[in-house]
Amino acid sequence: MAHDPLAFLEDDLRQLKEQGIYRPLRVLESPQGPRAVIDGKKVINLSSNNYLGLATHPKLKEAMVEYTEKDGVGSGAVRTIIGTMTIHLELERRLAEFKHTEAVLVFQSGFTCNSGVIPAIIGKGDVAISDELNHASIIDGCRLSRADIKVFPHKDMAGLRKVLEECKPKYRRMLVITDGVFSMDGDIGELPGIVKLCKEFGAISYVDDAHSSGVLGKNGRGSVDHFGLHGQVDVQVGTLSKAVGVLGGYVAGSANLINWLIQRGRPFLFSTSHPPGVAAACIAAVDILENEPELIEKLWENARYFKKGLNDLGFNTSISETPITPVIIGEGAKAMKFSDRLFEEGVFAQGIGFPTVAQEKSRVRTIVTATHTRGDLDEALAIFAKVGREMGIIK
């Protein structure tokens, strides 16, 4: 019998299944909407990042089809060779205007933004100072930089000050990084305090607005706009894959930052650029953000209603302040069983456990959208109540 050097994976997978935390991929068999067909079952969809419903918006679809017909299905090269098309430059110009920054550079995803930008601006002899609940892409970007990494307690400005005081004499550069909205708990980053301390200690400020883009600030401009900090945050990362409804990520900042990343941002340098239809659809989404603010208002109206409903039922929604509303269950297998029972009853809300969150804080994460109706939310709340009582999670 041939030797299989990966045979150990079978045992590792078996352990996950025995612990009740193995998750097969769910298959979406319909458009990404408030109600969807998943694994052949019609359900209320509470796990989509399609906050504003733009993934299926007619204007985005029209733009994608138009530019696909005009310029083809792919760009055919990386940006630094012959993969920069007119539509890419137009998207970056529009995003820079939208974010009120000098310039923007689009990457293939939000994850590649963090894995490309952080190593391009810090390295050996520097230090990355990261909130303890920052996204995995930030953690990986810090590791790739080969800078030292320090972690401060979640949103704790006294803790951050202590780290900065310790690091100031030791390092050439200090980079302080936070999420704008934390993806697991749905709370908003302590950006004003971070900006203040970065100015005091001469550190670089960096915010990842993946879950803030299209959600926080005027017209969805993000956490910098939400706090009125334009011109005071050195690096802003945003996404085109969540509320914007399409695909990709971007970095907004000074012209010098963007010009440097064009020379040294490895994912940008070594990955083919977006298809022209994708870039055109993103521009259409920016148009909608600027001209249809009622979508964001509806998102927040739905989020407040659903969050209150869960709290009134007795569920633990942790420290959520945004449309991301976790339902904390505790033990991982129980959270996955809760998610599975919700699905059986007609609600898709994905269970999340270790290593994404601490084992004792396993949860079902819900995200409402602007396109959910009050009827959708009431039906979902009734199902949460039924399953929660059945499993002894609420009384």
Image (cartoon, rainbow, N blue to C red):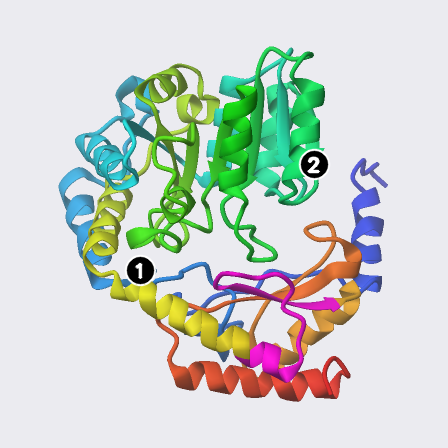
Q: Can you say which quadrant of the picture contains the N terminus?
A: top right
Q: Amino acid at mark 1?
A: Leu
Residue 391 placement: quadrant: bottom right
Q: Secondary structure at mark 2?
A: helix
- Indicate which disc, 2 or 1, sits on the residue closer to the N terminus: 1
Res 33 visible: no
Mark 1, Cα crowd under 10 Å, few <14 / some 14-19 / many 20+, is many
Instruction: Identify residue for label 2.
Output: 159
The image position of residue 28, as x and y in percent, is 47, 66
Q: Amino acid at mark 2?
A: Gly
Q: Can you say which quadrant of the picture contains the C terminus?
A: bottom right
The image position of residue 351, as x and y in percent, is 65, 65
Magenta highlight range:
309-329
Residue 277 placement: quadrant: top left
Residue 119 painted magenta: no
The image position of residue 333, as x and y in percent, is 78, 67
Residue in front for this viewpoint, 320 or 353 = 320
Q: Is residue 308 left or right of residue 335?
A: left
Q: Secondary structure at mark 1?
A: helix
